[in-house]
Image (tube, rainbow, N blue to C red):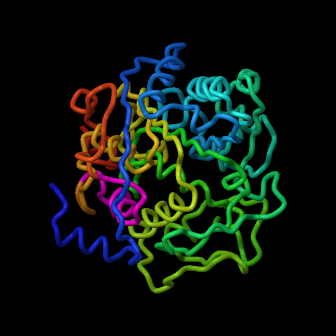
Amino acid sequence: MTLSRRSALQLAAAAPALFARSAPASTVAIARVRGYDRAIYDTLKKLTDQAGGLSGVVKGKTVALKLNLTGNPGRYPVKEHLPYRTEPGTVLALCQLMARAGAKRIRILESFFPARQEMELWARYGLDIQAIENCGTKVEWENTNNLGRGKQYVRSKVPFGGYVFASYDLNHSFTDCDSYVSMSKLKNHWIAGVTMTMKNNFGLTPCSLYGGDAGENGNEDPKQERPAICHNGAKTPPKGVTQELKPDSPRDAGYRVPRIIVDLCAIRPVDLSIVDGIDTIRGGEGEWNQGVEKISPHLLLVGRNQVCVDTVCAAAMGYDPRATRGQGPFVRGDNTLLLAEAAGLGSADLSKIEIAGLALKDAKMDFGPGPMGKKILG
C-alpha cells in the first residue's frame, strides 16, 4: 500500500519547516553472495565500484568505520546460529579494501559494554584483531560508549533543527574523521521495523550520557542502555546536555526512536553504507526478541546515500518502503525512511534510485510481516 497524499502531507508537516528541497537519490549496488569466504573481498570491491568508487570516500582520509555489534555479549554471547552482529570476515575485507584505496587511517567504532578500551573486548566478537591491524594502513579502535580516548564530548547540532533533540553530545570520533562508513546487518527491528544503515547510527549516543544510569552528571562507567532517556523519555539527559525540544511530545518508543535515528543521521551522515544480508535473522534485531530465527538471503548491498540504501534493503526484504505505521514491517513505530526523506536526507522512492548489479526483483526475500517472531512467521 502506498502512502496517501494526506498521510504524506501529515508526515511532512511533522518535520521542521525548511524541507523544501528534493531528497537526493543515488545508486545502490546489490550482489548475491553465498558465504563469508575470500570471495567477500572481490564482491565488496565490485559493489563499491558500482556504487561510485571507494577512492573518493577514503583516499588520504581518516575513515571512521561503525560496526553493528549490538547486544551486550556479557548477557548475549556470540552465537553462530543467530548471526545478527557484524560478521568478522567482512570487517577484515573492507579494511583491506580501504587500505588499498589509500585510506590514511581507519578508526573502528562501536558502542558496547563495559565502556572500556581493552582490545579483548573487541575480540569477544570474533574479530581478527591482528589481521585487521595488518590490513595495510594505521588502524585505531574506540569504544564510543563514553568519552573513550577523547578529552571532551562534541556537541553536534542537527542541521534541520531536530525532531527530538536540537543537538547531541557524542564521542569525538564521529566528528574527528574525514569520512564515515557504516557496516550493518539486514534484519528487522522490534520498534523501528527494520534495522540497516540508519538504525546503526542510533549507537552514536553514548550511554554515559543517554543511558538509564547517566544520572544528573553523566556516568563514565554506564551499565544501563538507552530506553529511559531515548526510547521512552522517562528520564532526561544529564545537566549540561541538550534537553528535548518538546517535553510534551509522545513518550512512545515508536514515535521517538525513528525520529532520534533521523536526528543522528543528519548529524553524522553515512558516506558509504554496507549492509550484510548474507546470513542474518528475521523477526527482530537480536536474540532478546522472542522467536527470531536465522534466514540466509545471500545478499550484500552497498551505496553512498543512507536513505536510498535502506529503502532498497526494505524492498529486498519484501516490504513497501513507503508503508505507514501499522503496516509491515512498521508494526510498532513510524517509518524512519519517510521521516528521513522529509528531512531531506535521501529518497525513499524506489523509482528514483538506480540499482546496479543484481536486479531488485531477483534479490527479494520473504522476511515475513515484520518484527513479530516465529509465532507469526510460522
- Quarter the C terminus occupies: top left
Residue 107 percent coordinates (x, y): 71, 40
The magenta stretch spans residue 124 = no
On the picture, is 326 further left or further right than 30?
A: left
**Percent of width and height locating residue 371:** 34, 49
Quadrant in the picture for the N terminus: bottom left
Q: Position of residue 193 (x, y in %)?
A: 36, 53
User: Would residue 334 be counted in the magenta stretch?
Assistant: yes
Residue at 17% in and 56% down: 2
The answer to which image quadrant residue 74 occupies is: top right
Q: Please identify the dominant SS of the magenta region.
A: loop
- Tell me where residue 358 sits by quadrant: top left
Q: Where is residue 65 in the image (x, y as percent from the top left)?
A: 63, 41
Q: What stretch is highlighted in magenta?
A: 328-348
Give the residue at x 60% y 70%: 157
Name the residue located 52 percent from the left edge and 41 percent from the top edge.
272
Look at the picture and state if 269 lies above or below 236: above
Q: Is residue 213 visible?
A: no
Whether residue 373 sits left or right of residue 207 in the image: it is: left
Is any atom of residue 360 visible in this view? yes
Above or below 88: residue 352: below
246, 47: nearer the viewer? 47
Residue at position x 26%, y 33% in the image: 360
Count of numbered labels shown in the rendering: 0
Q: Is residue 124 above or below residue 305?
A: above
